[in-house]
């Protein structure tokens, strides 16, 4: 019987000799574990907050909640990217209440009218003469996040002022992210998805890297829609066959809990989108491919176009290369999370190529697409099932533990869980996350 207290090590069975890996289901329902996750995982990681293309010009801003904190991501008047905590230094109100805007010169708190410039400095207080000499206006600017790093437009933040540096944290995930960003001058396409699920956030980590469920949960897409469109059905190909879609490529731990279901390769393996783009944007795709080859050389261009399958930057940034997706999610309770999904695409796209990319993205990942509603249904069903966690205690994540790992197995989930367990119990990265 597991310890229902704080001993997370008892929540995982990791038996490498016999090839058995199990998670105790309290990990998905327990409030104390959830609070500990907030402190040990979310408050001590580099977390993806947004992309600079969402606020390209001075005075542009977006607001977004990251790890429960309301943030303002702003391009200040000096051109700097800043991430400020969205709370008034007077009595706490949200200073900016809009989701997005441009041309801002100041942020004015609607409650009692304090005014901050786009660098976060406090610039105006109605009735300022009522304050004593000890009142120091300069020390009362909007507080920046404790740590921020802008990697090629990807803005990461940390709420740990002593956070290890970004490159060290990213480990072997950095070249994989760079491979994604090498698709071009990348932008987040206007209009991202915000949705929620009544499910534990770790279920979506698992699901977002899970090749196994595709043929079942998304049977209509893979078995019917793709052949009906005259496209090869990704899920029907055996996992070891060369030329497979990247979701069935080699699974690789990337250090510190990061993991990919398909490491970028120059072998010419296409990404999931390739056959669709070839069919619906053939000439435009050829022009784009030529640009990519001119810029990077033919081998690297193939690697960039092939992409990396689905990969996790621990704890909660999922990049789904085959569909050009960036996805984050934050729990507000053990059984509820809010999700952001963005399409990240090259600005170099011609209108035809962009249309085809977006059709592919929306058809599968959109709110009315073939995948997202199915996944919501699947994960909420798991959470409902966890109501029996006292009687049925363990979930199984053992696939491929004694055989060659593929995207149809579950190594990618074990990597996540091993880092999770290490963070929860020791506060340190796992020494090793592979089998
Ligand atoms: S809380 Fe913002 S001005 Fe008072
Ligand atoms: Fe899915």
Image (cartoon, rainbow, N blue to C red):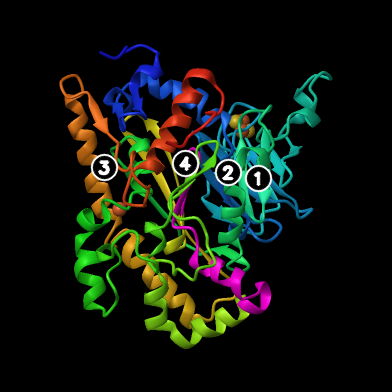
**SS of the residue under disc 2:** loop
Q: Tell me the residue that label 3 is attached to.
A: 379
The reply, left or right, for residue 237 in relation to residue 323 is left
Q: Residues within 10 Å of mark 1 (few under 14, many from 20)?
A: many
Q: Tell me the residue that label 4 is attached to.
A: 316
User: In the picture, residue 136 is in which quadrant?
Assistant: top right
Q: CA distance from mark 4 to mark 1?
A: 30 Å
Can see residue 430? yes
Read off the magenta span.
Answer: 293-319
**SS of the residue under disc 1:** strand
Q: Mark 3–mark 2 contact, CB under 8 Å?
A: no
Q: Tell me the residue that label 1 is attached to.
A: 107
Can see residue 195? no
Residue lying at 49% horizontally and 24% vertically, measured from the top left: 422
- Return the disc, 3 or 4, that comes first in the chain's sequence: 4
Q: CA distance from mark 2 to mark 4?
A: 25 Å
Q: CA distance from mark 1 to mark 2?
A: 6 Å
- Nearer the observer: mark 3 or 2; the answer is 3
**SS of the residue under disc 4:** loop
The reply, left or right, for residue 70 in relation to residue 416 is right
Image quarter of the N terminus: top left
Above or below residue 51? Residue 128 is above
User: Residue 173, image x and y in percent?
Assistant: 57, 47
Q: Mark 1–mark 2 contact, CB under 8 Å?
A: yes
Q: CA distance from mark 3 to mark 4?
A: 16 Å
Q: Mark 1–mark 3 contact, CB under 8 Å?
A: no
Q: CA distance from mark 3 to mark 2?
A: 33 Å
- Return the disc, 1 or 2, that comes first in the chain's sequence: 2
Q: Mark 4–mark 1 contact, CB under 8 Å?
A: no
Looking at this view, is 291 or 150 the one in front?
A: 291
């Amino acid at each position: 019987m597991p310890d229902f207290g704080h001993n997370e090590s008892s929540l995982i069975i990791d038996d490498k000799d016999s090839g058995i890996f199990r998670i105790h289901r309290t990990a998905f329902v327990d409030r104390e574990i959830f609070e500990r996750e907030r402190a040990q995982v979310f408050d001590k990681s580099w977390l993806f907050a947004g992309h600079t293309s969402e606020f390209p010009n001075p005075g542009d801003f977006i607001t977004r909640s990251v790890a429960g904190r309301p943030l303002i991501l702003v391009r200040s008047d000096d051109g700097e990217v800043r991430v400020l905590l969205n709370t008034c230094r007077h009595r706490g109100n949200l200073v900016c209440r809009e989701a997005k805007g441009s041309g801002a010169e100041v942020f004015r708190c609607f409650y009692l009218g304090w005014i901050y410039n786009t660098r976060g400095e406090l610039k105006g207080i109605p009735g300022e003469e009522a304050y004593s000499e000890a009142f120091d206006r300069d020390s009362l600017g909007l507080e920046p996040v404790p740590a921020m790093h802008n990697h090629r437009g990807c803005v990461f933040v940390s709420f740990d002022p002593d956070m290890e540096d970004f490159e060290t944290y990213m480990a072997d995930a950095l070249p994989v992210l760079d491979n994604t960003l090498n698709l071009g001058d990348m932008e987040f396409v206007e209009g991202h998805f915000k949705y929620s699920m009544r499910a534990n956030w770790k279920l979506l980590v698992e699901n977002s890297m899970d090749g196994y469920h595709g043929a079942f949960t998304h049977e209509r897409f893979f078995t019917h829609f793709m052949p009906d469109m005259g496209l090869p059905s990704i899920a029907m190909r055996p996992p070891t066959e060369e030329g497979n879609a990247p979701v069935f490529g080699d699974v690789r731990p990337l250090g510190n809990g990061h993991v990919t279901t398909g490491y970028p390769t120059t072998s010419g393996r296409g990404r999931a989108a390739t056959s669709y783009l070839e069919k619906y944007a053939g000439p435009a795709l050829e022009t784009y491919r030529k640009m990519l080859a001119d810029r990077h050389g033919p081998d690297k261009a193939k690697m960039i176009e092939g992409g990396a399958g689905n990969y996790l930057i621990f704890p909660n940034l999922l990049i789904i290369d085959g569909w050009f997706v960036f996805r984050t999610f934050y729990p507000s309770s053990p059984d509820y999370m809010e999700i952001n999904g963005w399409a990240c695409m090259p600005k170099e796209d011609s209108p035809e190529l962009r249309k085809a990319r977006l059709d592919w993205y929306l058809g599968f990942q959109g709110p009315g697409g073939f995948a997202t509603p199915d996944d919501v249904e699947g994960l909420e069903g798991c959470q409902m099932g966890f109501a029996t966690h006292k009687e049925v205690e363990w979930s199984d994540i053992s696939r491929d533990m004694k055989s060659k790992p593929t995207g149809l197995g579950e190594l990618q989930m074990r990597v996540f869980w091993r880092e999770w367990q290490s963070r929860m119990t020791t506060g340190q990265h796992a020494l090793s996350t592979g089998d």
